[in-house]
Image: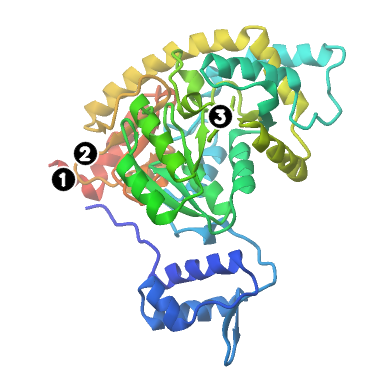
């Protein structure tokens, strides 16, 4: 049997609950020991220990005869303190560090991007040269508040082709989809608010939300989208402000929300006054425009974000937000306040690739290549006994269940020792309920060593007993 991942202790859970109150209302009186023990359903001694530790770090002030108060001084914020304490093999931030810092020869089937030789390097160089030679190109000045207008015009056209009714005025450029989501959260949320996310979901959603100091509630994800019964129950119980999802070619599962689920989801959002944020970063991987939430909603309750980091270049740092007019104005002001706009240089290069046909030709070659890699990787994983959660119609991710009682965190540790980075399931699961799953990036699985290392680690895992 694989080793179990230890969750937070009762004292750590109590400390996290107190920290949330401190962040939400500095200087205010905190609950009594008895009151907090009843709220959290823990012993009074657990609460006493939690308060003692926080007094020692200066986060809480103890006033004899008056109780405990939230400290008013500014305390450095550390993401690792904002959520559960993970084993390194399933710590999202540690996984990100490992995948980005890995040396070039490393095997990266757990990464979230295409190999360098799959990206249009020559096209990028050509567009950079063209922009640099163009009279009137902005190489030195700040951008306009919403970003480079010609690119916003191209994005509006492309979104309308997918059924998302946008115009250049309802689009705000950002330097990535992650920055777009961060800006939206700053705009709509306050510390302590609740956000619904898929379980599993793209692991960086969790880190982004932790940085906003909000509560996350995971909704089980199915092959047709979020579990709507659980979604409705969470809306009633937690009164969330926002739902964050990838509706088309979901990360990590590769599934896409069905039309029926999307319609019911939008009705639930309306009934509970919930804003939906749809990350469309993978939409260009499929040649058939699958309707997501924004296409059905008309950018009324849905905010749509995207970027070109997966399909074109992670170095250009070019993303966008599409939302209704009254929200775009506030988001634009927030972007100016926090970053003073975006890079016109990146926007001009991206726009050139969209308008000269290079990006279209690149996608036309990329999609069938991904499909071939998907077929090969599927065959290899099934030979090793892994069970695919679904068979995606496009994209680059496969969500696969290990056989027997194998623990994906243990497999990932073994693989890392052999120079291969895997993405174990609980990296993506807020409930930590995906311990037997791995996410595979099919574009990074061409090297036969990927499956050789995986096979060796599976054969040596303590959980192999379930296979014999």
Separation of disc 2 and disc 3 at Cα?
Answer: 42 Å
How far, Cα to Cα, is label 3 from label 1?
Answer: 49 Å
Q: CA distance from mark 1 to mark 2?
A: 8 Å
- Write down the residue under mark 2: 403
Q: Quadrant of residue 448?
A: top left
Give the residue drawn at x 28%, y 37%.
Answer: 456
Q: Visible in this render: residue 68?
A: yes
Where is residue 329 drawn, in percent x and y? 71, 36
For the residue labelled by badge 2, is the local secondary structure a helix, a strand or a loop?
A: loop
Name the residue that disc number 1 marks: 466
Q: Position of residue 219 (x, y in %)?
A: 37, 45
Dot 2 crowding, Cα within 10 Å, few <14, some 14–19, many 20+: some
Looking at the rendered structure, the number of numbered marks drawn on it comes to 3
Q: Residues within 10 Å of mark 1 (few under 14, many from 20)?
A: few
Question: Residue, x 48% and y 32% (percent of image)?
Answer: 112
Sequence order check, earlier mark of 1 and 2: 2
**Residue 299: mark:** 3
Q: Which of the 4 image quadrants contains residue 172?
A: top right
444 on left or right of 65: left
Question: 134 above or below 299?
Answer: above
Residue nearer the viewer, 349 or 172: 172
Image quadrant holding the C terminus, namely top left
Of the numbered discs 2 and 3, the one sitting upstream in the chain is 3
Q: Are marks 1 and 2 in contact (CB under 8 Å)?
A: yes
Q: Secondary structure at mark 3?
A: loop
Mark 3: few/some/many CA within 10 Å (<14, 14-19, 20+): many
């Amino acid at each position: 049997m694989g080793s179990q991942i230890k969750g937070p202790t009762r004292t750590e859970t109590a400390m996290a609950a107190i920290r949330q109150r401190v962040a939400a209302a500095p200087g205010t009186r905190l609950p009594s020991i008895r009151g907090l023990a009843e709220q959290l359903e823990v012993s009074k001694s657990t609460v006493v220990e939690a308060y003692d530790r926080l007094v020692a770090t200066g986060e809480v002030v103890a006033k004899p005869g008056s109780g405990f108060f939230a400290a008013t001084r500014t305390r450095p914020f550390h993401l690792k303190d904002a959520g559960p304490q993970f084993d390194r093999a399933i710590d999202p931030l540690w996984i990100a560090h490992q995948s980005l810092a890995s040396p070039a020869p490393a095997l990266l089937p757990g990464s979230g991007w295409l190999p360098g030789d799959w990206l249009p390097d020559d096209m990028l160089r050509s567009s950079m040269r063209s922009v640099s030679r163009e009279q009137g190109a902005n190489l030195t000045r700040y951008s306009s508040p919403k970003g480079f207008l010609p690119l916003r015009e191209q994005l509006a056209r492309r979104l309308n082709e997918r059924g998302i009714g946008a115009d250049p005025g309802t689009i705000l450029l950002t330097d990535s989809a992650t920055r777009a989501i961060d800006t939206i959260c700053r705009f709509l949320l306050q510390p302590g608010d609740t956000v619904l996310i898929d379980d599993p979901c793209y692991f960086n959603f969790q880190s982004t939300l932790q940085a906003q100091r909000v509560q996350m509630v995971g909704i089980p994800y199915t092959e047709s989208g979020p579990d709507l019964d659980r979604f409705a129950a969470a809306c009633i119980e937690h009164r969330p402000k926002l739902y964050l999802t990838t509706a088309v070619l979901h990360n990590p599962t590769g599934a896409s929300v069905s039309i029926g689920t999307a319609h019911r989801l939008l009705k639930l959002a309306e009934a509970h006054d919930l804003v939906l944020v749809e990350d469309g970063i993978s939409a260009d991987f499929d040649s058939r425009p699958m309707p997501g939430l924004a296409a059905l909603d008309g950018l009324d309750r849905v905010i749509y974000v995207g970027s070109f980091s997966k399909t074109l270049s992670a170095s250009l740092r070019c993303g966008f937000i599409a939302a209704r007019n009254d929200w775009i104005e506030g988001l634009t002001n927030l972007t100016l306040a926090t970053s003073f706009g975006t890079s016109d240089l990146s926007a001009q290069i991206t726009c050139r690739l969209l308008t000269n046909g290079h990006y279209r030709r690149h996608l036309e070659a990329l999609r069938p290549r991904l499909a071939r890699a998907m077929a090969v990787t599927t065959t290899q994983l099934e030979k090793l006994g892994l069970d695919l959660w679904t068979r995606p119609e496009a994209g680059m991710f496969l969500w696969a269940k290990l056989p027997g009682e194998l623990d994906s965190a243990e497999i990932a540790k073994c693989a890392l020792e052999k120079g291969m980075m895997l993405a174990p399931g609980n990296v993506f699961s807020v409930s930590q309920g995906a311990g037997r799953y791995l996410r595979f990036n099919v574009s990074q699985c061409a090297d036969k060593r990927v499956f050789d290392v995986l096979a060796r680690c599976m054969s040596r895992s303590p959980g192999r007993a379930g296979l014999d």
